[in-house]
Amino acid sequence: MPKFTSTAALASGPGFLDAEPLAPDFTDEILGFLTGLYTEPGTRRKTVLTYDAVSMLVHELVDRLTFGVPRPHISVNRDNVPYLALHTLNAAVFAIEAGRLAGYGNRLFDLGMASLIHDLGMLVVPREVRESASPLSPEDLRLVHAHPEVTLKEIENWSLISAFTKIAILQHHERCDGSGYPAGRTDAEIHPFAKLMGAADVLSAILLDRPYRSRLSATAALATLRGMAGRGLDPAAVDFVSRSVLTE
């Protein structure tokens, strides 16, 4: 199966991102795992959230995207699949492929690990807040802004987790102009992996329907992402993530 070029992809219209990059059985497997991970409450989630379970899927995901014929995007509007599960897999695929293009071949596993669990901390935010169509209150915003740190708390007993994975999780919402969270770090203070993850996270989010807005078309999403280069997102990270979608 040939890769999409940017010309062919954009010419095919906004639905080109709805194609599956992975074997359907594996896509179903990983989305099933993520659905359980992001919906199971409390103690039951602990039985799903293990280093071994996540690392096995990440190894397979990296191998399939690196050594297969990558089409780095997944179905962005699947019925009956929670937003966080779809968003997480989208972001992981974009981040892994962007990392490969950026020359981080020996660290794609770390990027993949960070991507698959980066939003676990959002589970402490009440569903009605996560899915609110209205502006959030200061208290609700504080909950949202704490989610990277809460994610790290969830995996604090994972002795094998790398420092690269941890910093990518912690900083993926930091912005180069200092407008991000949780620490308001600026350009030089943000790890390159977190910059890649931040751009992948944004692209995945705007390609999915949310209660407060409709998904953007592929063309509009890429234009929006590129418009954020140098205005919050790192220009090089934006370039790599854009190229991860439109692989030449």
Image: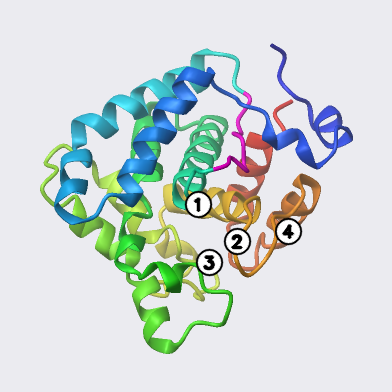
The span picked out in magenta is 71-79
The answer to whether the residues at label 2 and label 1 have Cβ atoms under 8 Å apart is yes
Closest to the observer, 82 or 157: 82
Kindly identify the amino acid type of the residue bearing the numbered disc 3: Cys
Between 179 and 26, the one lying in front of the other is 26
Q: Which mark is residue 83?
A: 1
Within the image, what quadrant is residue 29 found in?
top left
**In the drawing, does residue 72 fall left or right of residue 49?**
right
For the point 75% across and 45% down, the residue is 218
Residue 14 position (above or below residue 134): above
Query: For the residues marked 3 and 2, what is the alpha-carbon distance in whole angstroms?
Result: 26 Å
Q: Which label belongs to residue 210?
A: 2
Q: Which residue is mark 4?
A: 224
Measured Cα–Cα span from mark 3 to mark 4: 17 Å
Residue 182 in view here: no
Q: Is residue 78 magenta?
A: yes
Residue at label 3?
176
